[in-house]
Image (cartoon, grey):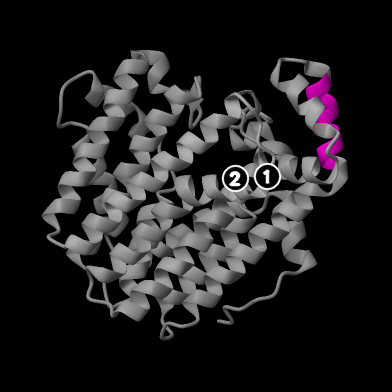
Amino acid sequence: MNISAETSAATLDAAANGRVGDRTRERLAEVARLVGGGLAYVEAEIAEAARHGAAPATQAAAHLIAGGGKRVRPAVALLASACAGGPSPDAMEVAVVAELLHLATLLHDDVIDDAGERRGQRAARVLWGNGISVLAGDLMLVHALERAHRLGCAETLAELLGTLRALVDGEIVQMRGRTVVDPSLETYETIVRGKTASLFRWAMRAGARVTGAPREVVDALGQSGEHLGVAFQIVDDVLDVDGDAAATGKTLFADLAEGKLALPLLLHVQGTPAALARVERARAGDREAAAELARDVLSSGACREARRRALVEASAAREALARLPESRSRDLLAALAADMVSRAA
């Protein structure tokens, strides 16, 4: 497989017409076949974790888990391990930790964002209240840290703590936008690298390290994971602006009220500074301003530019993988990076 594929118009068109949701699911099915029972183990263990603790926090966590998910983070952890000859039992634990931590952030994010739904069902905070949703997230975080500690790898645990700091810092920087919108690309990158890319990076580094990979392999996989995480988030942003809400489960411009500027909207504001005033009116509840803003963004080419940036990140993820020995797991990681760029949520 050629893992240094160039950005092409055909790939951009695929991203635009939403063919990648099915493609990504097919790719993850290939991953499941390659890593054996790894993903099944993750599914069983996160469900078991939600049974250990005090109710109703356990019920809130179980409710989120029952809603499903692609389990992308554990998948890339297992593939990273497979690149080093795994997956090993310890790498399977890393995969569980990555998903537990992701679940914790979802339970917390829904409270921060006053979300009504998550994965097509009522959010845990709606059913059990904000306090319980926060504590359910804390419970998943504790389970993740306990499992990471039991691995007995000081470096992996230290990097996990660093990842938690990055996640928190990213959330704090993002929340500043509720008071004053920051239309800078630098701030956007800080948020994306903290909130999304950091966990992809940790999952792939840790999955490889606990399997016994040499440092250069761990470093290459970590770099690939960071670029993959950025691409993953950019595509989410494109769907927030240019997606089919019925297909993606998203409400277009849903993040605007929380001061979050999806990348296409941010790029539009960068090119048309006067649009920032319309952003402020839309945030204040002006439906006409929001509709005009949506039309302007869609006609400006900002979504195409955002997709191009996602493809650049995906290409960088594949280039990092090119430093590894050839293997089916490496090729699947490269293919997954390409597929995610044009996925449908």
Mark identifier at residue 239: none
Instruction: Tell me where the magenta segment starts and ends, as one range.
Output: 289-298
User: Residue at the location (50% across, 75% down)?
Assistant: 320
x and y, in percent, of residue 306 in the image:
71, 52
x and y, in percent, of residue 149 in the image:
15, 52
User: Residue at the location (27% across, 77% down)?
Assistant: 213
Given residues 274 and 43, the one toward you in this image is 274
Q: Is residue 294 magenta?
A: yes
| Secondary element at image label 2 | helix
For label 2, the residue is 187
Image quadrant holding the C terminus, namely top right
User: Residue at the location (23% across, 18% down)?
Assistant: 56
Q: Is residue 179 magenta?
A: no
Circle 1: residue type: Ser
Main SS of the magenta part reads: helix
Relative placement, left or right, of 226 versus 236 is left
Is residue 258 shown above or below 155? above
User: Residue at the location (78% across, 32% down)?
Assistant: 276
Q: Is residue 190 visible?
A: yes
Evaluate if marks 1 and 2 touch, with contact meaning CB atoms under 8 Å apart: yes
| Secondary element at image label 1 | loop
Circle 2: residue type: Thr
Q: Residue furthest bottom?
A: 325
x and y, in percent, of residue 233 in the image:
56, 48
Is residue 76 shown above or below 268? below
Cα distance, mark 1 to mark 2? 5 Å
Mark identifier at residue 184: 1
